[in-house]
Amino acid sequence: MSSLNLPVWFEIGSYAVLGIILLADLVLAYKRPHLPSTRESSLWVAFYVVLALVFAALMLLLGDAEHAGQFIAGWLTEYSLSIDNLFVFVIIMASFKVPKKYQQEILMVGIILALIFRGVFIVLGAAIIENFSAIFYLFGLFLVYTAYTQAFGKDHSDEQESRLITFLRRHVKITNEFDGNKMRTVVDGHRTFTPLLLVFIAIGTTDILFALDSIPAIFGITTSPFIVFTANIFALMGLRQLYFLLGDLIDRLVYLKYGIAFILGFIGVKLFLHALHENELPFINGGEHVDWAPEIGTLASLLVIIGSMSVATLASVIKIRRDPNLPDPAVVAAGDQPTDDSRSGS
């Protein structure tokens, strides 16, 4: 792969601007908790998508087409995995009966935690790759296994999470009622935690699990830490608004998990082939590179990612419209419109 040649001012400026946007979004969610309207959510999601495309265009102008394509492919991969993350957020919010008015703030905290965990894994992953290129074998096998469990296996995270919640309820004083957006409150003169503590722990645990999947996936597309980190930031920005935009539809996109599984499996195979092509392990081909192992280019990866998500989404929408037991998307979207009281703010 060619080296990433971008001006230093662009890289530093990108981190600064993205940090300011995330901070502003966090403050906005905390200071003005409300249920966003469909129009408001749509505008914010569109803004973040356009921002990512503008960023890719700048990379093309200041760098080259190869790395701009790597950013787009990495962004779309992380975006699809982040949408999968929203499925779990929906379950968490419902199980704890979180008031919708405060879900924005909680989601924003979840996104910040996801960035922190992914940032840590990116640094570790880059260091490991730099000193131990054979890690691509493990990354590839891990993603293929993850793809299989995504499509056909059972997710045991709910069981593990319920055990953690049960343990905390036994050993920590936690009330059953929320007190606004407070994590601690006073009940009968005693300080106690609110269920908000459990919600944050559940979301944080989920973020760690998804970071373990997402980082090997994007390292299968690019080894540039700058592209890896910025793609993750752009993929997480706007998820809060996307959560409210999709509403109840998110758990009706029944084929989305298969599209994500196919992407993970494809990248896993790509990583394994790359590992063979760059092989240095003495017990494989005598420590020599495996010449027959093809390198899958960025364009092919981009086409597979876009095609997989498009087919999975289209198939899900068709099923929603044809299945009499599932409501029509237009009806669900109309039903999710908030009241006038919740339309104020941004």
Image (cartoon, rainbow, N blue to C red):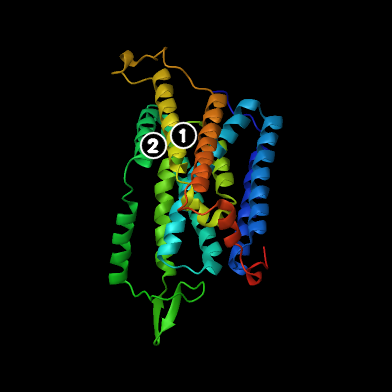
In the rendered image, residue 39, in percent from the top left (x then y), is placed at 67, 57
**Residue shown at 43%/56% (left/top)?**
204
Q: Residues within 10 Å of mark 1 (few under 14, many from 20)?
A: many
Q: Is residue 124 among the parts visible in the rendering?
A: no
In the rendered image, residue 110, in percent from the top left (x then y), is placed at 49, 57
How far is mark 1 from mark 2, CA to CA?
Answer: 8 Å
**Hey, which quadrant is residue 3 in on the image?**
top right
- Amino acid type of disc 1? Ile
**Residue shown at 46%/71% (left/top)?**
183
Q: Is residue 230 among the parts visible in the rendering?
A: yes
SS label for mark 2 = helix
Contact, CB < 8 Å: mark 1 with mark 2?
yes
Q: Is residue 209 left or right of residue 227?
A: left
**Hey, which quadrant is residue 167 in on the image?**
bottom left
In the rendered image, residue 301, in percent from the top left (x then y), is placed at 52, 28
Residue lying farthest to the bottom in this orientation: 189
**Residue shown at 43%/27% (left/top)?**
271
Q: Is residue 7 left or right of residue 94?
A: right
Which residue is tagged 1? 263
Residue 147: which numbered mark, if any?
A: 2
Q: In this rendering, is residue 140 above or below 31? A: above
For marks 1 and 2 on the same chain, the one whose residue lies earlier in the sequence? 2
Q: Nearer the viewer, residue 13 or 76?
A: 76
- Amino acid type of disc 2? Ala
In the rendered image, residue 218, in percent from the top left (x then y), is placed at 49, 36
Q: Quadrant of the N terminus?
A: top right
Q: Residues within 10 Å of mark 2 (few under 14, many from 20)?
A: many
Q: In this rendering, is residue 146 above or below 192? A: above
**Residue shown at 68%/43% (left/top)?**
50
Q: Quadrant of the C terminus?
A: bottom right
Residue 335: which numbered mark, if any?
A: none
